[in-house]
Image (cartoon, rainbow, N blue to C red):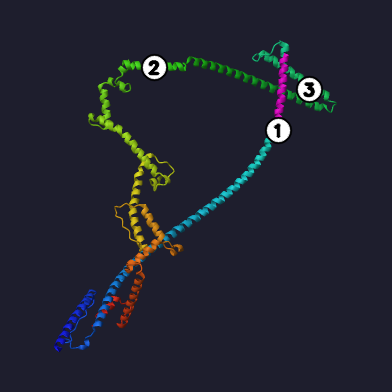
Amino acid sequence: MRLRVIMHVIVTCCMLLQQEQRDWDAVNRLLQHHGFKPVNFADPTENKNLAELVLLERKSASDVRLMLKTMLSDSERRQGLIQELIQSNSQLKEEVQQHQTRAARQSQRAAELEGILDGVKVKVQDLEDSYIGKAAQQHSHFQQLQQDKRDAEKRCQSLEQKLSQEKEQVSQLQKKLQYAVREEERRVARQNQAFQQIHRRSARLNSTSDQQILDIVDMYESQMQQLRNELKIYKSSSGEKDSSNSQKNRSTVEKDATDTSSNYKALLKSYQEQLKETKAQREELRTEIQRLKEDLESRPTIKELKTCKQQLRHLDRIIQQSNIRPSQALKSQDSAEMLNTNNTGIQYLDASTCKRLLMDVCKELNVQDVSHLISAVKVQCKQPESAFKLEKILHDITAFLTNPRAPLGLLRQRAQTNLELSREAEFELIVPTLEVWSRQLTSLADLHCALIRLEKRLLPWQPEGSIPAPSDPVRVEDLMLIVDTLLDETASEDKVLRSPTRHTLESMVAHFQKLFDAPSLTGIYPRMNEVYTKLGEMNNTMRNLRDVLDLGIENENYETLQRCLCIPV
């Protein structure tokens, strides 16, 4: 009975030992998978040095195995987190480097802009100096103009005074002239009256004898006027004191009388000559008018012209119907100028002329075979229609390109110059403009990819969209949507930061679910607490191990674990 019990105990111990060994084999595989040394089972009979052996209870062994499994799983998760942190750190380093290069470029650009600003300041200073100089010149010129204006006003006043004086003189002279004209009219009337009393008729203008008689009458009239003036002077004189004055007055009166008589004669002669000239001109005009009237009467009327035209047309129709050819056309058939190449006269052309015309047509149309001439002519007739359609299409394209709202319209040639471009020049600019547009459209794909990368970098919690294929067309609406999303999500205003959108919150929650491996929303915060708690415990354990093993702070975690595994158990 005791032996049976002993055997039962031995069998049970063997089974437990095998089960324990299988459990430790699983743990050893995990340790070896992570690069650690396995836990070895020692036979007490083989190892005589019992101090090197460790005896564990079954419960302690299970606790140790559970602890190792937990640590290994935690180390795997932490290793994954560490890898993510390393990747994020490398990305941050790249971003920092990019920011540094961008900052260097910006600083270089700022230095260049400062240089440009200094140059602009110098130019502005030069312009200010030039404008100040121009302003000073204009001020001096303005002062000079004001002085000229004052001088002109003074001169104008003096001229106005002179004008008023001259007006007074003119009024006086007009009065004297009116008095002289009245006196001359009276004198002429007296002459005519005396001439009528002598000859019982009026004086003739072209008669020399009548003119001599008038001159004699005028002379007697002047003498009588002189005698009357002398009588007036004698009557007005009252003594010897006034004798000298009377003589002076008499001499002045005589002089005035002679002067006025001579002036009146010259005026009368000039008037007579002008009358003669006007009469001759009137006679010439009358003869010219009479000649023109006779010429107009000799010309045909409108009705006569219409009837002549109708008769000519009727005669032309008769000639065409009867196929009559003039003798001169028969004599000069060889000359090209006199050939009748109308449709009605083709049948009368000779063979040499027809051959020559056919050769010219084939040469112009570039036709080698005469049988192909009709098809070539048809093609040439169709070309104007197609050319008209193409020209209309080109006009529509140029109208669209020259629109002020069109981007890069005709390469801004019309904006650079005030001269109007011809049609050929506008047509030549269509192809370069379309090439520029095609390059801009192809660069939209690169811009789309760059905006997607920027969105991933600035908004990592956003759901990843589908990356467009190179063959897919890129629309401007997609680019505007990405830019609007970036502006909405990265707005730096306090109101936007205090009140994020629902889409932003959902994206952030999804990002944390993916980061902390939480299947539901309620498990995010417990999982975060668990992860950070275990991370703190691991950091404390590593710190304690470094202190026990006398390792420095600069040693990494994997070096510490390798040092611990090298210690024999």
Q: Main secondary structure of the magenta part?
A: helix
- Which image quadrant for residue 448? bottom left
Tell me, yes or no, if residue 27 can be seen here.
yes
Tell me the distance, in whole angstroms, between the alpha carbons under discs 1 and 2: 76 Å
Q: Is residue 193 magenta?
A: yes
Say whether residue 467 is magenta.
no
Q: Position of residue 29 (x, y in %)?
A: 21, 75
Indicate which label's residue lies in the foreground, 1 or 2: 2
Q: Position of residue 479 (x, y in %)?
A: 37, 55
Q: Nearer the viewer, mark 3 or mark 1?
A: 1
Per the rendering, the mark at residue 312 is 2
* Mark 1 Cα-neighbour bin, 10 Å: few <14, some 14–19, many ≥20: few
Look at label 2 and name its amino acid. Leu
Amino acid type, residue under disc 1 in the picture:
Glu
Tell me the tag on residue 229: 3
Q: Earlier in the sequence, mark 3 or mark 1?
A: 1
Q: Which residues are magenta?
A: 165-194
Above or below, 503 against 549 in this view is above
Question: Where is residue 117 shown, x and y percent of the image?
Answer: 46, 58
Query: Which sits earlier in the primary sequence, circle 2 or circle 3?
Result: 3
Q: Nearer the viewer, residue 488 or 261?
A: 488
The residue that appears at 72% across and 19% down in the rendered structure is 187
Name the mark on residue 168.
1
Report helix, strand or loop for mark 1: helix
